[in-house]
Image: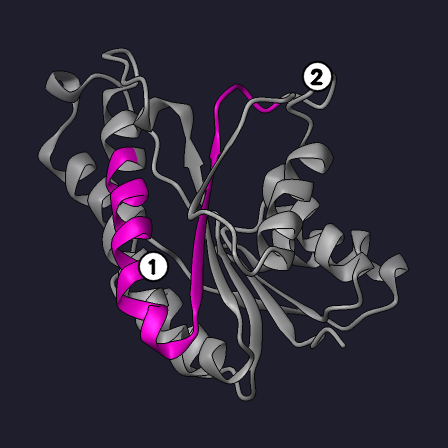
Amino acid sequence: MENRNLVVVVGAGPGIGAAVARAFAHKGHPVMLVARDQSHLDALAAGLADTGVEIHTAVADAAKPGDVARVISSVEGPLSAVVYNAAAFGGPLLDSSADEMVTAAQVNLHTLVSVAGAARAGLKAGSGILITTGGGYALYPSSEYGVLSVGKAALRSASFVLAQELEADGVRVATITVAGAVDPATAFAPDKIAQAYVAAYENHSGEVETVYTGE
């Protein structure tokens, strides 16, 4: 029987984050939403009230070293999944300030690694999975979105490395590379993308990377 332990969604927003939370809630998992603003979290939680599962919220900022890991470390008991949906956007590399680049590296890489470390014991106890939200710019970099391209490339590589490092603990890692613009009116609707996260959770022998093309 499936263990319906807690699912933590880091970077919970009105798009993919909320859709992933709803998809797991419909599977019977209690959910914790993590984002920077409590009022924003309250609105998301209210929108999930109809699922009938426990919805928890926690305020943390992925741009602040250790902030999200602090929240994850406070969670007691086994975890079914931790979804890392935080991202730092930006334009061309040469037009970006040093501070912008440092923040992007923190959000796209360093906080992910610290979250993996903080969630390790809970995911091991729950035979769970760490799922990251990747992007097509990791595969096809764009100078117009240079910071995002580099950030998603770092996240993608980190996901593969973390999969190797956590394998001995029985913790799986998956990255969902969303190869298109999220748009509710298209095949890249958040609710449709969210099903790829559930599929990754349910597929215990799947590949690390799923490239979501809307097909």
Question: Which region of the structure is painted magenta?
Answer: 153-182
Helix, strand or loop under label 2: loop
The residue at 64%/49% (across/down) is: 199
Instruction: Using the image, tell me which numbered label, if any, was put on residue 186.
Output: 2
Q: Is residue 108 above or below residue 62?
A: above
Quarter occupied by residue 73: bottom left
Question: Residue at horizontal 69%, vertical 27%?
Answer: 189
Quadrant position of the C terminus in the picture? top right
* Colouring: one colour
Residue shown at the point (42%, 37%) measured from the top left: 134
Residue 202, position in %: x, y?
A: 64, 58
Q: Position of residue 210 (x, y in %)?
A: 49, 38
Number of dots carrying numbers: 2
* Left/right of residue 35 with respect to residue 55 in the rendered view: left
Instruction: Give the number of the mark in front: 2 or 1.
Output: 1
Lower position in the chain sequence, tag 2 or tag 1? 1
Residue 54 showing in the rendered view:
yes
Inspect the image, locate mark 2, and give the three-letter code of the amino acid beneath it: Thr
Residue 142 lies in quadrant: top left
**What crowding class fits label 2: few (fewer than 14 Cα within 10 Å), some (14-19), or many (20 or more)?**
few
Q: Amino acid at mark 1?
A: Ala
Give SS at disc 1: helix
Residue closer to the observer: 70 or 53: 53
